[in-house]
Amino acid sequence: MIYFDNAATTKARDEVLDTFVKVSKEYIGNANSIHKLGFESRKLMNASVKQVASLLKVKEDEVIFTSSSSESNNLAIKGVLDAYPNRKRIILTTILEHPSITNSLNSLKDVEVINLKLDDTYHIDINDLKEKLKLDPILVSIHHVNSELGIIQDIDTIGKIIKENSKAIFHVDGTQSLTKIDVDLTNVDLFSASAHKFNGLKGIAILIKKEKINLSPIINGGESQTVYRAGTPALPIIASFAKALRLALEDQPKAYLKVKEINNYLRYELSKLDKVTINSKLDSSPYILNFSIKGIKPETMIHKLESYDVYLSTKTACSSKEDYSKSIYELTKDKEISRTSLRLSLSKDNTLEEAKEFIKILKDNL
C-alpha cells in the first residue's frame, strides 16, 4: 500500500496505542473522583498536561484537551465572542481556512467576517493586515499551514503586528504544522492541533489558551480537566496525546528532511508531465503537494489509483462536496485547475521508493 493522504489522518504509532491500552486497563478511575483510583488518574492526567505544556513551552493551565481540531477552532472563535460581549464583533480571517473555521464563522449572527488580502505568493498582505486592524477586530483567526496547498503563514510576524497595532486576539489553526515545522507560540493567543495528524489517536486534540485570554465554554457541565470544557476527562487518549506529541517532536528534524526529499522528487517528476499543473508553491510545507491533471476528474484518478492500492485525496477531507476547490479557484481564478486538483500529503512513514512507484503508476494511467 502507498498511503499519501496523511493530511487527512496518519497511522497511529504502536507506542501510542500501547499507552492507550495500558492506561485504559490500569487507570480505571474517573480523574474527578475523590477516591484513590480517581486520585491516581488525576495524577497521570496532570503529568500528561505538564508534558504537553513543557513540549510547547506554555503554562500547564493554558492546555485544554478537546475531541478534535474542529472543536478547538469552534471553542476559540465562539468562546472569545461570548467572553468579550462588549467588543466589536469583527473577525479577520482568510479565504484559505479549513471548513471548521469558515463554517464556524458562517454560523455566527451579527458578526462581520473580513478576509485579509493575500499577496502573489498566497501569504497574508502585511500592509492590509495593519489597515484592517484599525477596525478594532475582536479576533484574527488564520491557519499556520494550509491543509490543501501547504501554504505557510508567518505566525510570529503576524502575531507581533497584531499586538503592536491592536487589542485583537490571535488564533492560529496549527493542525497541519505542529510536529512538522517549527511552532513558536510566543505571539499566539490561541492555538489548535489534533493528535491524529502526527501519528496519534483520533478523538483527542488541544486548544492552547494563553493565561490572559478569557474564554467561555461551548460545552457546559460538571468538573473536568479545565473549566473551559465539561465532560469526563478521556485519560487514555489524553496520555496517548502526550506520548504522540513527544515522539513526533523528537522525530521532527529527521522526518522533515526525509519528507522534503520525497516532495522534491515528486515535484520534479510531476513538473515533467504535460497535463499536470503544480499548485503548491516552492515555499509550501513539504508535507503537502497539490497538483491538477487537466482533463481528468479527480474522482476518476482517485479510484484508478485505488485499484493499485495507492491512496491520496482530492482536497481537504472535511471540505464541502462541491466539484471544485474554492481555495484554489480563489487563488488561480481557473475553474479547470480548481476542479481537477489532487493532494499528496506525506509523513515520516513514506519512502522515496513509494514516490517512484506512484509516479510510474500515475504515468501509466494518464
Image (cartoon, helix red, strand yellow):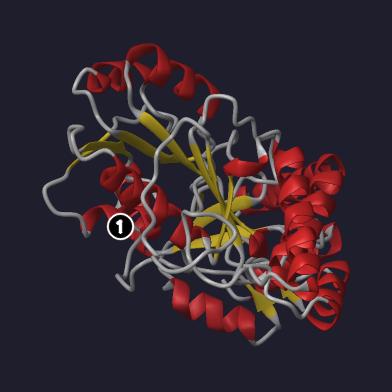
Instruction: From the top left corner, tell me how far across and down residue 13 is, in percent.
Output: 82, 68
- What is the number of callouts on the image? 1
Give the vertical position of 142 relative to 118 (above or below): below
Residue found 55% across the figure and 83% down from its top = 303
Instruction: From the top left corner, tell me how far across and down residue 253 is, in percent.
Output: 83, 39
Instruction: From the top left corner, tell me how far across and down residue 313 is, in percent.
Output: 54, 69
Residue found 33% across the figure and 69% down from its top = 320
The amino acid on which the numbered mark 1 sits, given as a three-letter code, is Ser
Judging depth in this view, the residue of 28 and 355 nearest the camera is: 28
Q: Quarter of the image containing the C terminus?
A: bottom right
**Residue projecting furthest to the bottom:** 307
Question: Circle 1: is it few (<14), some (14-19), or many (20+) Cα within 10 Å?
Answer: some
Give the vertical position of 213 relative to 4 (above or below): above
Q: Quarter of the image containing the N terminus?
A: bottom right
Judging depth in this view, the residue of 355 and 131 nearest the camera is: 131
In the shown orientation, is residue 56 left or right of residue 223?
right
In the shown orientation, is residue 289 left or right of residue 215?
right
Residue pointed to by mark 1? 104
